[in-house]
Image (cartoon, grey):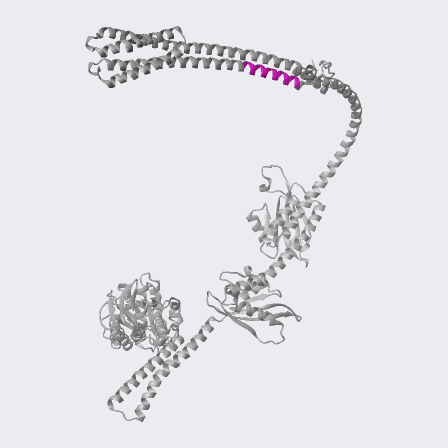
Amino acid sequence: MKLNPYITKSLSRQVVSLMTGCIILFIAGTGILFFQLQSLHAEYIHHRQTIVEKQLLVEDILDQYHTVFLNSASKNVVNNEEVKEQAVQEETSIRKKMEQFKAIATSKEDRNMSNRLEAFSDYYFSEHLPSFRASPENMGGTQISAQISDFRSLIKSYLGNLTEKRDENVKDLTKEQSILQGVFVGFVLIFLVIFLFIIRSIIRNIGKPLADFSAAANEIAAGRDAVITVNESRKDELGVLSIAFKKMVSSVQEKEQELMAHNEELLAQQDELQAQQNELQVTLGIIRDNEQKLTRRNELINGISSTLNKNEVLKSIVFNMSKIISADRGMIALVHEDASSSFGISENGVKQFRNNIHSGLNYRLLKEKKPFTIKREQLDAEKGYHENTNYSYDLYLPVLSTFQEVDAIMVFSRYGTPFTDQEVEECETLAKQISTSLDKIKLYEQTEGNRRLNQDILNTIKEGIQLIDQDGKVVQVNQPFCDIYKAGSTPEQIIDLTWEKWSAEMSDQTEGDRFLRSLDEAIQHLEEANHEQRSFTFKKKETNQVIKVYFEALRYREEGFGTILVYRDITKEYEVDQMKSEFVSTVSHELRTPLASVLGFTELMLNKPLKPERQTKYLQTIYNEAKRLTALINDFLDVQKMESGKQIYEKKYVEILPLIQKVIEHLEINTEHHDIQLQIETSDLMILGDRIKIEQAFTNLLSNSIKYSPDGGRILVRVHTRNDMLSIDIEDEGLGIPKESLPHLFQKFYRVDNSDRRRIGGTGLGLAIVDEIIKSHGGQVTVVSQYGQGSTFTISLPRVTQKGMGSNHDGQSIKLSYEIMVIEDDINLAELLKYELMDSGFHVNYFNSGRKAFQELKKSPPDAIVLDILLEEGEMDGWGILRELKVSAGLKEIPVFISTALDEREKGLSLGAKDYLVKPYKPSQLSKVIMHTLLSNSKKGQILIPHSCNEDEQV
């Protein structure tokens, strides 16, 4: 009784109590059924184990009897004690198992079977087996066999009954399980019915009142009267809710009446607010229009002030101005410059406007300098799909400079709507701002132009220029300084660098700390009163450049504002100074040594009586030292001639093999420790060169190989061809050359700084002379060396292809099959030229008539033509032949050499002559010029124009 009021006061308690009862009922029923199922299963297991145990015992007894029967059936084992003993053991085991079987025998059949087993065991072990052992021959086998057979049948029958019982036990279990399953299903159905009943009760007691409340609420929301059907006597939440709901309904009705009164007041206020809103909408539209105008003006101002690029500014002006005045098309063009931008206008229209910028309406604008508008009928291209007559309004605006000159013209077109006076005034105001922007751009361009001019001027200076302010920050540099500072850098990358950054970068590139230390000292002493030139020198690590820095303080009105530093590359001067020092040291040694010998032996010969043999020896020594001095002086003179460009080369066709053999034979006499081998790998051994100079080059290289191979060894001279070059390799097994010395090897006075080489001696001029000689012959000298293992010097010279065989001035077996045509009216001079050219190996055809010569030219074109200008009167002169040759496709490539007394060299060369020789000249000069040109053409596939020589020059 105490629990019932507690539950009825709460809906949740009611639901929980009903659910709890359902759960308890379900758990109790399920537990009982589970207990019954477990009991049934345990009983089945127990019966089955008992039956199985009986079966096993009976089967074991039967098996042991089989063993006894088999052992006792043989007459041979009657007196066998082992078999007797085994029979006794079997008997004991059988009786023990029979006792076990008797203990578990529960049914009458089991007890009957136990008694039968005991009776058979007593008979067999107590009567039959002892009698059989006593007199086996008297024991009949038929009777015992029948008894044993009956015994076996009995056991098998029993075992069959046990099997049937086991099967019946399984069937009983299955049947009882089926019954329990049916009971469980019925229990579940009953539980579901009870559960549905409980749910129905919950819905009736809770759901229906809630639905009534919902319907009542909807009625109240719709403004209708609501009736609450919930029993107010209920003590739960629904009862409380029904009382509160009724109170709320009455309160709502009261409030509704009050709200109706307020609503009438609000309607009146709403009408008043609507009128105010309309006024605000109009004001807001005006404000938005002004805001849009301000936004467009700001865009215009930002566009013309955010950049100094003229084209971008013009583009921004025409675009934003078109938006501000709602123009359909627009354009701005500078009057004094070719710059413009447009909006909605084609390129042809822009060109047309630019071409007529000083005429038409533009002329009126330039004169009046005031804006104006015009009304015109739209063109067909402007109408689009409209067929009626429409009008377009054009606004012309001038952009005046500070000097009241028209700098730019703006034109805008608007379809259908004219420009108001207010809009024109606004545009005129904006034009002033545009004018300010264009003036700023003009000033910037002038400043930028001056800056670029100053920068270009600075960049043309060979020295590096750097301007820093009082704090050491970089203000201005030129490109040569950028190259010194860092390869590939530009002034823009270096300007504005701080003192710490650029000085540290420069210090990292120099040897030691001299740069930073000297720079600090220089800056500190800039305020001193003396005006001595301040400078210091440093050397870069990677490039080995030697830089000299000059610096000076900059002042304006006695106040310092920075420092200018000038960086001068003195690497060449530095190297020259070093070479001079090296030269003085080398020359003093190389000259004094042979002079000492000459003076010493001369003094001996003058002051002492000597035998003729000793006098001869001393004279030979003096002669050798004099030759050594002569060679040294000749080297100096050759270097001086080469540097001044006065070296003369007597170039002829030379076969290289005899020349090399001569050099080898000459040098082999003076060495006993070197094996000089000559290896020929080509048959093209002809070159065009100066025999003496080529021999000098080979002598220098081969003597170097001998001199710098103090331990002897093999020296291989290998002659071979590579492409169009004849190459001569001179390979030795000497000291070799360090890798760092290879780039400087052909510099004058350069010697490898090595004690072994210093001991050997030399001037350092030999390789420089060789390099200059070979380059003058169109070749090159290369070297490959490994320090300590020898060197290979290679001379490469242009090959000469032989076109015929004959003899030259040196008696060598060469003759060139070039055909030369000489056109000359002077018979004596013609004979002289003919013999000179024939002696040089050419085939010569002579003509004194220009017309006949030209006819022969068409039939059989020669390789070259020697042409006189003044021929016999009435004949074709030299100018006519030259013009005809150069317009003929088959003859224009023939080189023509003019030989005349007229000094009109420029005219001859302009008409296509290869060279112009003015009489008188040396005949050999002509043959050498022709030879050089023809060989150059055959070697390189192109026509070269050689320079004519003076009277005393040789080619």
The front one of 637 and 825 is 637
Horizontal and vertical percent position of residue 361: 64, 51
**Res 764 quadrant in image:** bottom left
Against 46, is 517 above or below? below
Residue 374 appears in the rendering? no
Most common secondary structure along the magenta stretch: helix
**Res 607 quadrant in image:** bottom left
The residues colored magenta run 13-30
Counting every numbered tag in the picture gives 0
Horizontal and vertical percent position of residue 76: 19, 16
Q: Residue at x 58, y 17 (%)?
A: 23
Assign the N terminus to one quadrant of the image: top right
The front one of 710 and 66 is 66
Does the stretch in magenta take in 14? yes
Residue 291 appears in the rendering? yes
Horizontal and vertical percent position of residue 896: 33, 68
Does the stretch in magenta take in 467? no
The front one of 348 and 825 is 348
**Res 265 quadrant in image:** top right
Horizontal and vertical percent position of residue 194: 59, 12
The front one of 897 and 746 is 746
Assign the C terminus to one quadrant of the image: bottom left
317 relative to 227 in the view: left or right: left
